[in-house]
C-alpha cells in the first residue's frame, strides 16, 4: 500500500466505476423490460372493389390512434411504407381503405412503393403506447390471392415450427367474430 492516498483514491474510483456500471445495467434492463405495448385488437387486410388494400380494425379492449404499414429491414429497424392517424381513438372497429382513407383520417405517409417480393406488416398504435392492434405480415401476392369477401389476419397461430406467425384467411364476418377469441 502506498501512504500518499493513491490506493484509497483508486479504490474509490473503482467503486464509483462499478456503481456507474451497475446503474447503466439496471437502467438498460428496466428500459427494455417493458418494451412490449399491450395488444388489445386485431387488424385484417382485404381488397376493395378496385383491388386496393383495405384494413379492418377490430378492438377487443382499449383503442388505437392510427395505423402503420412497415417493412422490417432487419437488426431491429423498419421502414414506414404508409401511416394514417385516426380522427379519434378507435375503440371498437374501423374500416380504412389504405389507398383512399376516409376524409377524417389524416394521411401522414401515403401507401406507396410496395415491392411484390417484400413482406410487410400492418400495426395499430396509440400515441401514448398504451395499446396496439396486431395485423398480419403480408406480401402483395398474399393480398392478390384473396377471393372477394376474404381477409387475411394473424389469429395468434405460430405455425408448425412455433417460430413463424401464420395468417388466417377467412371472411370478414368470421374475422369480426373471431378476432377477440383467446
Image (cartoon, rainbow, N blue to C red):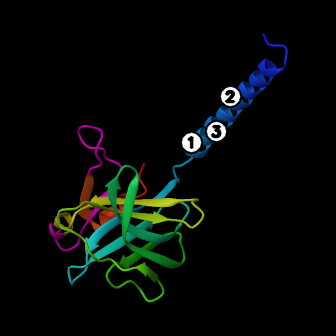
Going 32% across and 57% down the picture, which residue do you hit? 73
Q: CA distance from mark 3 to mark 1?
A: 14 Å
Q: Against 165, is 106 above or below? A: below
Q: Note whether residue 176 is visible.
A: no
Rendering quarter of residue 144: bottom left
Going 77% across and 18% down the picture, which residue do you hit? 7
Answer whether labels 1 and 2 touch (C-beta < 8 Å): no
Residue that badge 1 annotates: 33
Residue 93, disc: none
Q: Quadrant of the N terminus?
A: top right
- Kind of element beneath mark 2: helix
Report x, y in % for residue 176: 37, 65
Q: Note whether residue 22 is visible.
A: yes
Determine crowd level at label 2: few under 14, some 14-19, many 20+ residues with C-alpha closer than 10 A: few
Residue that badge 2 annotates: 18
Q: Nearer the viewer, mark 1 or mark 2?
A: 2
Going 43% across and 82% down the picture, which residue do you hit? 107
Residue 149 located left or right of residue 91:
left
Magenta portion: prevailing SS class: loop
Amino acid at each position: 500500500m502506498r501512504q500518499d492516498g493513491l490506493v484509497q483514491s483508486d479504490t474509490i474510483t473503482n467503486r464509483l466505476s462499478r456503481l456507474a456500471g451497475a446503474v447503466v445495467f439496471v437502467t438498460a434492463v428496466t428500459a427494455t423490460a417493458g418494451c412490449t405495448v399491450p395488444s388489445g385488437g386485431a387488424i385484417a387486410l382485404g381488397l376493395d372493389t378496385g383491388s386496393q388494400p383495405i384494413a379492418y380494425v377490430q378492438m377487443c379492449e382499449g383503442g388505437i390512434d392510427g395505423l402503420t404499414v412497415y417493412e422490417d429491414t432487419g437488426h431491429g429497424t423498419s421502414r414506414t411504407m404508409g401511416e394514417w392517424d385516426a380522427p379519434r381513438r378507435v375503440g371498437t372497429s374501423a374500416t380504412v381503405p389504405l389507398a383512399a382513407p376516409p376524409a377524417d383520417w389524416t394521411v401522414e405517409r401515403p401507401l406507396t412503393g410496395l415491392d411484390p417480393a417484400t413482406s410487410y406488416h400492418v400495426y395499430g398504435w396509440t400515441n401514448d403506447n398504451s395499446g396496439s392492434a396486431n395485423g398480419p405480415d403480408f406480401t402483395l401476392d398474399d393480398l392478390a390471392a384473396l377471393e372477394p369477401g376474404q381477409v387475411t389476419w394473424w389469429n395468434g397461430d405460430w405455425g408448425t415450427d412455433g417460430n413463424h406467425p401464420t395468417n388466417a384467411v377467412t371472411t370478414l364476418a368470421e374475422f369480426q367474430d373471431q378476432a377477440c377469441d383467446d
